[in-house]
Structures are given as structure tokens and as C-alpha cells.
Image (spheres, grey):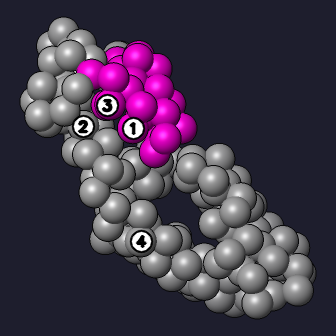
Amino acid sequence: KDDIKKSFEEFDTDTLSLIFTQITDIFSNNPTHFLQAIDAACNILFLSISLLPNGQEHLADIFKDDVDGYRSIYKCTNVDQVIEWLLFLRDGLIKCLKEQENTYTNRIVTDAKIYIRSNIDQKLSLSDVASKFGISPNYLSHLFKQYSDLGFTEFITETKVAKAKELMK
């Protein structure tokens, strides 16, 4: 889950592709595990809808040629069909992430998130991060609201909590 979330946030299509490959390989090697495969696919679907900005719209667009849209997962009756659905989802998500990554303003938010994650042990203010990227604090705050599911402060808090959990493990 964390790797999928991070790949969405950083537009890391290589990692996303690797995750999907690992998952589909597991189910290819275990064709009798249909319930586990459908559960995994539904969890990935939920993550995609909830973690991507406008996730439901993006998923609807990916599956626009299917009468049932992304809900076509529920028509799968065997592991091979689930794998086929997952690979179609993967390709659509990769295309979507590449399109989003190409916008300059979205790239600023992505780079700011990477900077925050790598410097989370330091005191990070909106002004400090904005100056690092040569933009005003108000503009960075606006960009976070527009291109992220969390505001700047919420992102810092969530990242600190995630780091604390990681250290506690």
C-alpha cells in the first residue's frame, strides 16, 4: 500500500509497474487463489480511486470502453481474468501518471513532496520549502491544494507520522 501511494505521489511509473508485475506474478503462480486475487484487485482499485486526485474520474476514463467501467472487476470468474484486468489497470494508471507528471505546476508539488520526505527530520515551514523552489509560500500552498489530496501542513504531518511509525517498527 505504501509503495503504491508513494508511486502515485511521485508519479513513479517504474515502481508502479514493478508492483503490478509482482502481484500478477504471484497470482499467475497460484491460479487457484481466485478470492485472494479479486481481493487484491479491489484493494488496488480502492487505493487508485482514493489516492489519485480525481481518482474516480481517471478510473472511469481508463475503463471508458467497458460497459461496466472499472466495476468490470466484479465480472471476473478466474485468476487469469483478474490478472488481465490488473494489467489493463496498470497500463491506464501509468498513462494517467505520465500525463499528470508533465504539467510544470504538478511537478513542483511532486518535487516539494520528495524534498519534504527526504528532510522530514528537520523543521520544515511553508516559507522554507517555497524558497527552496523559488516560489511564494501562498503559491506553493495553492499548488498543494490543487494537485494533492492533502494541504501542505497535512502532508507534513502525515509524513512525520509515517516516519514515526517506520521508526517504531
Q: Does the segment drawn in magenta span residue 160?
A: yes
Q: Does the segment drawn in magenta span residue 76?
A: no
Q: Distance between the residues labelled 2 and 4?
A: 19 Å
Which is more foreground, mark 2 or mark 3? 3
> Picture quarter containing residue 41?
bottom right
Horizontal relation, residue 71 to residue 24: left or right: right
Task: Tell me whether the residue at label 1 lies in contact with that at label 2, contact meaning CB atoms closer than 8 angstroms.
Answer: yes
How crowded pointer 2 is (Cα within 10 Å; few <14, some 14-19, many 20+) is rated as many
Residue 143, disc? 1
Disc 4: which residue: 99
Q: Taking the image as drawn, is residue 112 in sight?
A: yes
Horizontal relation, residue 121 to residue 145: left or right: left
Nearest to N terminus: mark 1 or mark 2: 2
Disc 2: which residue: 112
Q: Which amino acid does label 3 sit on?
A: Leu
Task: Tell me whether the residue at label 2 lies in contact with that at label 3, contact meaning CB atoms closer than 8 angstroms.
Answer: yes
Q: In this view, does 148 lie above or below 87?
A: above
